[in-house]
Amino acid sequence: ARVAAGQLVDHMLAGEDPSATEGGGGNTERIPAGFLDQFITRFADESLEEMLDVILVELSKSVRQVSPLGVFLPALRVIAELAAHPLSAPILTRSRLWLPSSVNGRAFENECFLGPFLKISTVGDIFGTGLPSVMEMCFSNIQTRRQSEVQASLGSLRASLGQLTSALHSVLHALLKGPTTRPQVLDWIAKVLKINMGRSKMNIDVFRNATHGFFCNLSVVMLKLCSPFMDPTKADRMARVDFTYVTASDRVDFSEETKLAASLDEAAKWVDPRNSSRIDNVREMQQIIERREMARVGSSSGAGSSEAPARPESAVGVGADGGGGGFHFICECYFFTATTLHLGLMKVISECFSHLQDMQRHQRSLQDLERLAPGGSGNAQVEAQMAELKSLVARGTEKRMEYE
């Protein structure tokens, strides 16, 4: 069954991937329309789960080193079709590849079958952005390229990424519509956020957190999921957003978030009255944070320091049923999206601004040198410095194109 499933993937992707014609793979015929539906129905009571496990592995592997210029839609469309089928959708969320027991965001991105799809992006990563290379194909020697070429490249990349996020939205939306698969999707999003909270730090540990591409794409998908209830003409839907979620949720931990213009007692009033023990937990957490801050200030001023007590277990993840504390889906989706944007899109925008400031500083330094010593004025040291600044400005411009 596993061998047959591997061969089936070749037919699923046939005629779409240019590399399939290499090495004699050009004779592979693509599966006809409606075949996948009949295949799922036929093997539902036999070895379907085992075969889908192989199919998911192979589909995920097919895009592991793919950039936005590569071929990724055929594999993602197959997953979307599997997610929309009532017999195969529960199998997807039960798969070991759906919610792997990864301890950090980078490992989760690599092990989850949706990870390689979400990772596809133009934004640089320490392990590259896949092939074909976006920088070489679209933005190399950008300062000598015509503006129309650059804009055409940007338009093509944006269209490709738009197709990617639309297909990813189709997968999650289809799974969310199923009453048996919705809790697993919410658990999936919650885990993604939980193990990537390190992205909120000023310096992200790229070896322990998911990539910018992963979170940028997830940010777009979450915004698409929010769009039905963000319509201002449908205020009754927004009324489902319960702001006690930040203190009563068992999916996302907001305890470390900054509280604006609220005293300890005022913050405690926002605690969900359905769980009165949380009032004591909030006060206890706040007191721990205050003692930790006082110890830090004391140590920095030479007054000595003391180890802050550990955070009590009772303050973490209350809600043994794992059902989100009874909150409506709209409420959970709203706060999931806000957290995703904080860890993803907003973080990338901040980093982009930082790169722009560096590039502008290099440009000003170059302009100052050119004004004081036009052409280097025969000074080898000045000429070398100007060449280095020009190189930095060129790389900065290319980097800006990645973000755009």
Image: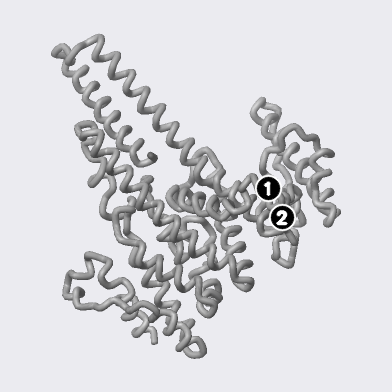
Specify the quadrant of the image occupied by residue 293: top right
Which amino acid type corresponds to the residue marked 2 in the rendered image?
A: Ser
- Position of the C terminus, as image quadrant, is top left
The kind of residue tagged 1 is Phe
Q: Which mark is residue 254?
A: 1
Residue where numbered disc 2 is placed: 249
Percent position of residue 100, x then y: 52, 67
Q: Horizontal placement of 370 versus 218: left or right?
A: left
Residue 10 point in image, percent of width and height = 30, 76
Is residue 74 among what the camera can see? yes
For the point 76% across and 49% down, the residue is 244
Give the x, y percent position of residue 45.
51, 89
Residue 164, given in percent of the width and then of the height, sits at 40, 56
Instruction: Return the mark for residue 185.
Output: none
Question: Most extreme residue toward the front, as rendered?
Answer: 233
Q: Residue at x 59, y 54 (%)?
A: 228
Neighbor class of circle 2 (other Cα within 10 Å; few <14, some 14-19, many 20+) is many
Marks 2 & 1, CB-CB < 8 Å contact = yes
**Quadrant showing the N terminus:** bottom left
Q: Quadrant of residue 262?
A: top right
Horizontal placement of 309 versus 388: left or right? right
